Image (cartoon, grey):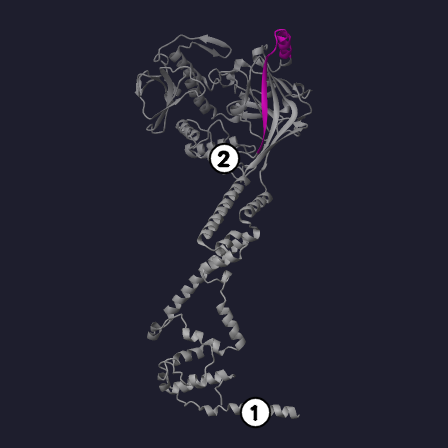
Amino acid sequence: MGAPGCVSWRCWLYEAKRTEASSDPAHASRDPSDLRELRRLQSPLFTMAPGEKIKAKIKKNLPVRGPQAPTIKDLMHWYCMNTNTHGCRRIVVSRGRLRRLLWILFTLTAVALILWQCALLVFSFYTVSVSIKVHFQKLDFPAVTICNINPYKYSAVSDLLTDLDSETKQALLSLYGVKDFPEGKAQKRREARSMRSTWEGSPPRFLNLIPLLVFNENEKGKATDFFTGRKRKISGKIIHKASNVMHVHESKKLVGFQLCSNDTSDCATYTFSSGINAIQEWYKLHYMNIMAQVPVEKKINMSYSAEELLVTCFFDGMSCDARNFTLFHHPMYGNCYTFNNRENATILSTSMGGSEYGLQVILYINEDEYNPFLVSSTGAKVLIHQQNEYPFIEDVGTEIETAMSTSIGMHLTESFKLSEPYSQCTEDGGDVPITNIYNAAYSLQICLYSCFQMKMVEKCGCAQYSQPLPPAANYCNYQQHPNWMYCYYQLYQAFVREELGCQSVCKQACSFKEWTLTTSLAQWPSEASEKWLLNVLTWDQGQQINKKLNKTDLAKLLIFYKDLNQRSIMESPANSIEMLLSNFGGQLGLWMSCSVVCVIEIIEVFFIDFFSIIARHQWQKAKDWWTRRRAPPSPETHSRHQGQDNPALDTDDDLPTFTSAMRLPPAPEATVPGTPPPRYNTLRLDSAFSSQLTDTQLTNES
């Protein structure tokens, strides 16, 4: 009987020889090659079919390339031999070191040029081209906001400002000997008095709160208190606020005031080269504090009504009146009125260019009601803006004079900028982390002022009077916030130095309209028409004005389109995606004769196969380490060469003979089985063949 489980003669021969060698240890000493013979019989190639054995030998002898390369060096060699980029192939196939070095140099230079040119293409992709288009069409008329320079009638606010005005007059009288001051409609002359004899009664409240100081150039670190006349030592910072436009001459005496925090330990002194500027700034601080405590409804009643401000009105050749204007109350300019506002049902437009088809108004300025310490000029301010834009009349308003006709010609320019990644503009301010406290569309000015007002509320605990109120905030005043002036000045200095971060956060709007203005002046009314014109206007405004008008109380304003040409400035990308890809392809083909397929090949080889080889090696090292850790220690294992086959067995692929099989030694330290091995004559190979022959004969006979 054969060995159980064997179906081929090789298996029978192997089992028989192994069993006989195991039962007879003396065979191990006959030949030293018996151990190699037994190992060869145990190899997988010996038990394979002839066809499978040939395939295994071919697969073993052929080099493994591409993603299955065993090392990175083999991967690079395979890539250079099979890639379509000619430079890499020439590095491998060129004979001679000089040629190889030259091809390496040429290839690296070409790669560097490709990278440089592609980087330039990427940078140029984020550039824009500007195009200017001019359209001739019917244009919408902008919104026009008009304010009197004097915010409130002096007769209405004089009760609130009596003490402040009195101290201001005495300061001017004592410092400069100014004796003529207007009071309502009349002027009174006062005699000069000494500093201490001016207030023989109650001490001044405002000069005690913020003392006016006189600085002498010869006395460093000291100043004379205006009220007490005593010299006091000045500690802390001294900030000189001089004019940035022109310097006529440097005076030896400077006038300023000192602001301190609550505990008076931290103070800052502000000096001015002009005493007029110092007193006006000092007066303005107290004025804002007083008006911040007055309700808005009362301030509207103390300012000018639309019927008082607007004497006559024409638009596009048709008459208009105060009903075409919308009230807008500004903290520093009082009642302002906007023509063609967004609250109107329809936006007015003009059909023709020229002064006859624009807005024409005559304004009543009423110089007798001006506050002499708050404003030093006479006239009105006008601002042209979009309907949904907040009118920053104090920043960009245009002043118009009395007794003059001011003509303002407009040209409309509309700008459209590209947002990120081309620029840092914003579409509607939604991506700017600043709360818009204005009831208007986003603009850079709105963002800056909103940021400063929010910082003011955060640092000082109150809001600055000239800007809108944030939610759940109050305007600053002495009673609730005694040191708000010091905090305001310190915060404003930080804002100017860009230390608050507002300038870095706020962005410019991507689209906006801008009107280029051309202003011209003419004396109005003329001497020939002055008498009858003023009489007619006085008669027309008899119910609103209880006095005879003179030309210094009036101002004429004309606002119109010079022509109906609208200029549009538009930004567009200098390159498109298609152009960028075609430029990339041109650079690759020029320097490396490469295409998109080559780029994909490079990505596959250098980013996928490269790292897969490294990962496979690391994984194999980890497996080997884990196997060595789990395996029990064996002296024979340490004495043998691991991971290498016997060269003699690899080269000898012949089938074992019966004689060599008889000489195979038993396995080291193998135990002899209890059952004796069968004899070879009991295998009865001939009987198995004879039974097959018998079956064959029976088949043929049938």
For residue 75, above or below residue 367: below
Residues at discs 1 and 2 in contact (Cβ within 8 Å): no
Element marked by disc 1: helix
The residue at the point 38 percent across, 80 percent down is 33
Horizontal side of residue 276 vs 567, given as left or right: left
Q: Is residue 286 magenta?
A: no
The foreground one among 702 and 90 is 90
Q: Position of residue 309 (x, y in %)?
A: 59, 18
Q: Which mark is residue 378?
A: none
Residue 506: mark in rendering: 2
Amino acid type at circle 1 is Ser
Which of these two is toward me, 129 or 251?
129
In front of the other: 494 or 504:
504
Dot 1 corresponds to which residue?
691
Q: Is residue 408 left or right of residue 39?
A: right
Depth-wise, is mark 1 or mark 2 nearer the camera?
1
Query: Left or right of 65: which side holds 130?
Result: right
Question: Where residue 145 sits: x, y (%)?
Answer: 58, 24
Count of marks overlaid on the render: 2
Q: Residues within 10 Å of mark 2 (few under 14, many from 20)?
A: many
Separation (CA) of disc 1 from disc 2: 103 Å
Residue at disc 2, secondary structure: loop
Q: In the picture, residue 580 is in which quadrant? A: top right
Residue 488 on image: x %, y %: 42, 28
Examine the rendering and report whether any part of residue 2 can be seen: yes
Q: Earlier in the sequence, mark 1 or mark 2?
A: 2
Q: At which x and y percent is residue 319? A: 68, 20
* Picture quadrant of residue 192: top left
| First to last magenta residue range | 511-539
Q: Label 2 amino acid?
A: Cys
